[in-house]
Image (spheres, grey):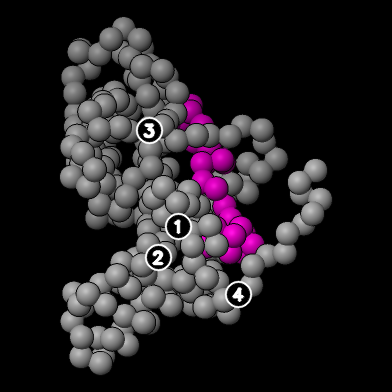
Amino acid sequence: MAIVGKEAISALRGATQEGAGSSERSTFTSLKSGSTFLVKALPLENIAAYDSYGIFKKVNSFEAEKPSIKNARGYATDELTPWDLASKYYQDKANELVEAGKSKEDAEVKPLRTKASEYRSKRKYIVPFIDLESGEVIYIDFTKNQAEAVISVIEKYEEKGRLETTPLELSKTGQKTDTKVSLTATFEEDLSETAAKNFKELTAENVTVNFEGLTFIADEKAQIESLLASGFDVSLIDLEAPEIDPTEAF
């Protein structure tokens, strides 16, 4: 399984740096449950990965300007970000209780483990496709499990040399945590006139993949501010709240 890792992160950052002087900024296309897109998949080399932080309905997702070093399981081990430190704070507290004999599901331990998970980064994958109806490149943000399902299909058709000749349907079904993403082949003869024209004319060679603007990249100050916004006491991890610039209000 050719799950992209460091190479994908490099691709994402490289594209961001190269496009820094450009006014062209891409946006994610929302793949809502019940929706389907007719697409042409692009080669695996166009897929990017990043580590996302954020808390649903509290702090919007962001990428750390200086990402921490992760182990094979995705846990931060060195050069920790403020959010990694917050996660570690709760995990260490939970570990202390477990080492003292409490169960991981204990009423004291479980909330700490939940908090640790909230502040921990989650690996996300950005997969670009050619939208056959609009004729534009769209960018879909996937979780690790969703990406594995999609990437395995792209990989299969790429290995067989059929990526350019197979139109696909990208769909999402289910609700909340019980959602499923699928990428399945469809028939070229069933495409609309517009979709069929785009399918023939648009290829990986003549479209541009631009990751600029897709993720919000937060520096240390912004990360500390977002920790405060989430209700976390940053003094617990030996950090201080950034000083407020009085001129920012003007």
Tell me which numbered mark, 2 or 4, is placed earlier along the sequence: 2
Q: Which amino acid lies under the numbered mark 1 shown in the image of this protein?
A: Tyr
Q: Left of 204 or right of it: where is 97?
A: left
> Looking at the figure, which quarter contains the C terminus?
top right
In front: label 2 or label 4: 4
Q: Quadrant of residue 94?
A: bottom left
Disc 1: CA contacts within 10 A as few (<14), some (14-19) or many (>=20): many
Residue 120: give its label: 2
Q: Which amino acid lies under the numbered mark 3 shown in the image of this protein?
A: Ser
| Nearer to the camera, 168 or 36 | 36
Residue 53: give its label: 1
In front: label 4 or label 1: 4
Is-magenta flag for residue 13? no
Tell me which numbered mark, 3 or 4, is placed earlier along the sequence: 3
On screen, 142 above or below 135? Answer: below
Task: Pinpoint residue 239: horizontal percent, then vertical percent.
Answer: 60, 75
| Spatial separation of the CA atoms under disc 2 and disc 4 | 18 Å
Task: Pinpoint residue 63: horizontal percent, then vertical percent.
Answer: 51, 55
